[in-house]
């Protein structure tokens, strides 16, 4: 007996089926579940050995995650049983990678490699820990920190050491400066009328 079943019906059965039954349905109706790869789109693949989440780049080397490790030079095998990744899956992976790289509140970064021509080499400061994945980009504070496989560069500032100084007045009586200075040269520039000084090492601190 021949029964006609619509494409929509088969896909609805597939959606509600267990994993083993999904595999059987996909095997019986391969044309209905064939994934047509689109350049720039994220896809996933997982078996007993590999856990892949990467972008299709037209048979060229691409970027993404292989067993949880991010790389800019991955090879996308278009013959495996790939499935389109959801924005939530991609966002979760990219947010974890952003945090691993050190993107967080208070960090400075610049777009020295990312293709944002207007923002190139300008330094931005992250003011919150809110991340957002939108249109293939990873954003923080509305600024892009990831685009087309490339991450912005975190700027690591060297700590600035500051000291107070003892100075001597005309009567050669010692006084401690009110302000902190990064060097003796800076102190003399601002207080050139004072006599030679000495540094109070115990008051050393790091200015953030």
Image (cartoon, rainbow, N blue to C red):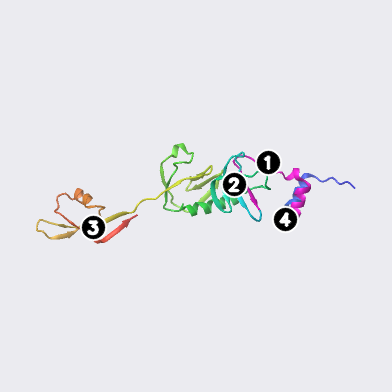
Q: Position of residue 189 (x, y in %)?
A: 20, 48
Residue range (magenta): 18-46
Residue at the spot 46% in from the left edge and 41% down from the top edge: 113
Q: Which mark is residue 19?
A: 4
Task: Identify the mark nearer the N-term, 4 or 3.
Answer: 4
State the SS at label 3.
strand
Task: Identify the mark nearer the N-term, 2 or 1.
Answer: 1
Task: Identify the mark nearer the N-term, 2 or 3.
Answer: 2
For the residues marked 2 and 1, what is the alpha-carbon distance in whole angstroms?
15 Å
Instruction: Give the number of marks.
Output: 4
| 87 vs 114, nearest the viewer | 114
For the residues marked 3 and 1, what is the alpha-carbon distance in whole angstroms?
68 Å
Name the residue that disc number 3 marks: 164
For the residues marked 2 and 3, what is the alpha-carbon distance in whole angstroms?
54 Å
Farthest residue, direction top: 117
Task: Identify the mark nearer the N-term, 3 or 1.
Answer: 1
């Amino acid at each position: 007996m021949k029964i006609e079943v619509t494409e929509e019906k088969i896909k609805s059965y597939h959606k509600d089926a267990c994993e083993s039954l999904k595999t059987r349905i996909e095997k019986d109706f391969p044309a209905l579940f064939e994934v047509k790869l689109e350049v720039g789109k994220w896809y996933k693949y997982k078996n007993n050995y590999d856990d892949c989440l990467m972008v299709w780049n037209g048979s060229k080397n691409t970027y993404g995650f292989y067993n949880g490790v991010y790389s800019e030079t991955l090879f996308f095998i278009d013959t495996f049983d790939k499935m389109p990744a959801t924005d939530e899956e991609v966002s979760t992976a990219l947010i974890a990678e952003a945090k691993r790289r050190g993107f967080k509140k208070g960090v400075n970064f610049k777009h020295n490699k990312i293709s944002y021509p207007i923002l190139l080499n300008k330094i931005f400061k992250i003011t919150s820990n809110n991340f957002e994945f939108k249109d293939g980009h990873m954003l923080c504070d509305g600024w892009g920190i990831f685009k087309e496989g490339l991450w912005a560069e975190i700027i690591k500032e060297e700590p600035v050491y500051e000291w107070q100084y003892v100075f001597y007045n005309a009567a050669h009586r010692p006084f401690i400066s009110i302000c902190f200075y990064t060097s003796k040269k800076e102190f003399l520039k601002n207080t050139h009328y004072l006599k030679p000084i000495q540094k109070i090492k115990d008051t050393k601190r790091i200015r953030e």
